[in-house]
Amino acid sequence: MARLDERLKHEIERAARPADPSGVYERLIRRRERRHIIRRIEAGVIALALFAATIVGFYLLVLAIPARDASRPVAPIPSLNGVIVFSTLAEGEGDVLMAVEADGTNLRRLTPEGTADYRSPDVSPDGRTVVVAHSIPSFNEGEAVLATVPIEGGSPTWLTDNLTKGPWQVQDPSWSPDGRMIAFAGSTPSEATRVYGIYVFEMATGEARLIPGTDSMLVGNPTWSPDGGTIAFEGAVPDPGDPRSFPWDIYSVRLDGSQLMNLTRTPDEGETSPAWSWTTDRIAFVRRGEAPGLFTMAADGSGEILIFDGLPNLASPAWSPDGTLLAFTADTAQVYTIPADGGTPSAVTGALGEPAWQTLPTGATTSVPTSVPPTPDSAQDIGLGFPVCDVTSVLGEFAPGVTGTAVVATKTGDTGRCPTDEGGDQLVAVDVTGDGLSDASFGPIECEPFCTAFAAPDVDGDGTDELLVQNVQFTIVGLRLFDILGDGDGPALVMPMVEPPGDPAGATQGFDGSAPPQFWIGGDAFIADALRCETGPGGRVLISTTAESLPHDSPDAVWRIHETTLVLDGGVLRVVEVRDLEEPAGPVTTPSFMSTSGCGADLRP
Amino acid sequence: MRVDEIAIREFLHTAYPRLVAAVALVSGSRPAAEDAVQEALLRAWERSEKGDEIERLDAWVTTVALNLARSGLRRIVAERRARSRLGPAGSADPLVAERVDVEHAMRALPRRQREAVVLRYYLGMDTRETARVLGIGEGTVKSTLWRARAALAGALGIEDDGTAEEAEEANDRGTAG
């Protein structure tokens, strides 16, 4: 063999560091267990279908022809119905969010390109926000965060509780009628104390609490009563005599766990996917087994009506806000609409996947947003000399007394199409004069997987705004700071560096001056990071905090916090204080350093 | 072969340590390499339990781990998870400087060349095996390695004393024999 090859082998052998396998098998086992929690629910549905199909076929046939309850006529209120939002698998990507008019027109995409998943959408009562179970490739299977996406489209916003405590297992989020709470099926992020059940997330506090009793069965698809006091959900208590059998029924329960009731009581059939109409007070659901169908019933389980049974794979009913129509999926997840008292379904062209129906915002005359967000394919001229696409922007006062726009965009490719996230050059540009054209730009910038304009806080307290750009989005959000400097030659956009020696302990974030500073917001498992803009004795400061809860999963855990305080001055960041401190890390307590939002960017929807 | 607890434990004590090192050389991230190899191993285990046949566990896991390690997203979250465990980088190890040289030279190579170099020179795979793991032709493996050798020799200051064809043939003979 040639000497060069021998040398290369030798050098690479010296450079490589073999891993220690001890403890890895145990980590693999834990990873497997996490996946099984979600999978067993799906398995339960299949097991029930097989069981029901073989044993109780005749009985199901009898039940499949129920008497119709005509005592509750539906009053049409046609002005309420907005678009249908649905989650669908995009080729080469994950499950993306789409929106379409109920007549199949104006099909459009709401979420950015990428491999992230946006599942189980539900539109807020004011019609402006979609909540989803949002997951990204790095999450373990079943893990997701609660996130919201504007109804007109845009990047997801992760709800604060998820950011601080790592991904939960989240399924089927559902808004309360007052928009203050979101119910979901899932479990807490802590492996050691994982409890699976129906949780209610409070928007005001960012905390989620388990509805007592729902952790004693397999659960899914919570849906709220019109008064917001009761939640209906699908639940299954495994049959002790046949562990393979999961008799799914529709249950209801008060928020405090009282009055837990089985509304369907069909031990040999499976009822799932309840959807409670806030207009008619009826619950739609799907029955599986020998005689599948889409049904509605009264809130106490009485007055069952078969709405439709003419297509296979019926699933995911969603009420129109006026209560006159039901959307549902059938066949290969095609979305249909049907009158709520039965009739012939109509396919919604282009809609494939779990639907949710928007209530038109108050005062809106049309469900089509007045300002359609830029799509990745729409090239725009913002005065840079070349077209850009995939534009996000934030307003700010970048020059005294003038409201301008800061933009993060992708340079459009030579073919006129918008490059993918990985292939395109992204840049930052700022219009300080408010004429719609950029006065300064900076790029390309490194994005993982994409960059967006994040916020325009006044970091240095000089009365004009700086710019924060989100350049990493993961379980944590990464931010870059840009300063707009003005001189005789016009404005300049710079990424301030930290003046050495800075904070050597923060070298991985560039706080030692070795690289552009990378700020973090959010958390991953037992790590929580934050960024605050505050006014101190010496003026405005930027406080970056990294913390870890130790020991992991312990009631005695404390946050070990490293805090770096910086001052922005003339395009340079100076470290003015470095502190290491501790505070108790309670199981649901938001740490003090996370109690403020990220420098002008409210992380809550 | 059947992938069960015994096979997993055997893999962990034989192939795992070097495979993690290999993926780390390719990806430039040790935490991402550990994450990718463990994920690949878990997927092999689950596929086998479903009845899928996995002919050679080490080759299968290597292919999947290299694919997983290509994701920059996985790298970031794995590094964040590992950050507190790893602590600050030490400088007492006398091999660190040389290691940095090799890692730097490797990082300058295109991804495909890095993968080919590590499979050949560190994991000892022959051309056919390397081609199979990377999902490319044997001719492509040879030309890829030829370019990588030249670049590494230049970067590390090693004299290139043989033709690529001679080296390839010698390598394949040595591995086969």
Image: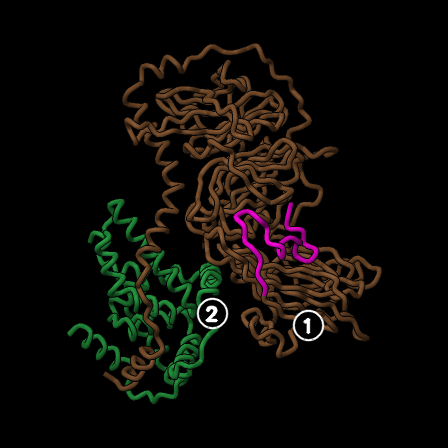
Chain colours: A brown, B green
**Residue found farthest to the left:** B177
The image quadrant of residue A529 is bottom right
Which residues make up the magenta segment? A581-605
Q: Which residue is mark 1?
A: A576
Q: Which chain is indicated by disc 2? A: B
Query: What secondary structure prevails in the magenta region?
Result: loop
Residue A317 image label: none
- Residue nearest the observer in this picture, A254 or A299: A254
Badge 2, how many Cα within 10 Å: few under 14, some, many 20+?
few
Identity, as a three-letter code, of the amino acid under mark 1:
Val
Residue B87: image tag: 2
Amino acid type of the residue tagged 2 in the rendering: Gly
Labels 2 and 1 share a subunit = no
Picture residue at 42% right of the left edge, 19% below the top: A265
Based on the picture, tell me whether residue A214 belongs to the magenta stretch.
no
Residue A425 in view of the camera: no
Coordinates of residue B104 in the picture (x, y in percent): 44, 78
Seen as rendered, the residue at the extreme front is A556
Q: Residue furthest right?
A: A401
Location of residue A184 in the rendering, given as x and y in whole percent from the top left corner:
52, 37
Q: Quadrant of the N terminus of chain A?
A: bottom left
Residue drawn at x 59%, y 64% as measured from the top left: A581
Figure quadrant of the C terminus of chain A: top right
Identify the residue shown where x is 47% and y is 40%. A186
Q: CA distance from mark 2 to mark 1?
A: 24 Å
* CB contact under 8 Å: marks 2 and 1: no
Q: Secondary structure at mark 2?
A: loop
The subunit carrying tag 1 is A
Q: Is residue A583 magenta?
A: yes
Q: Which quadrant of the figure has residue A515?
A: bottom right
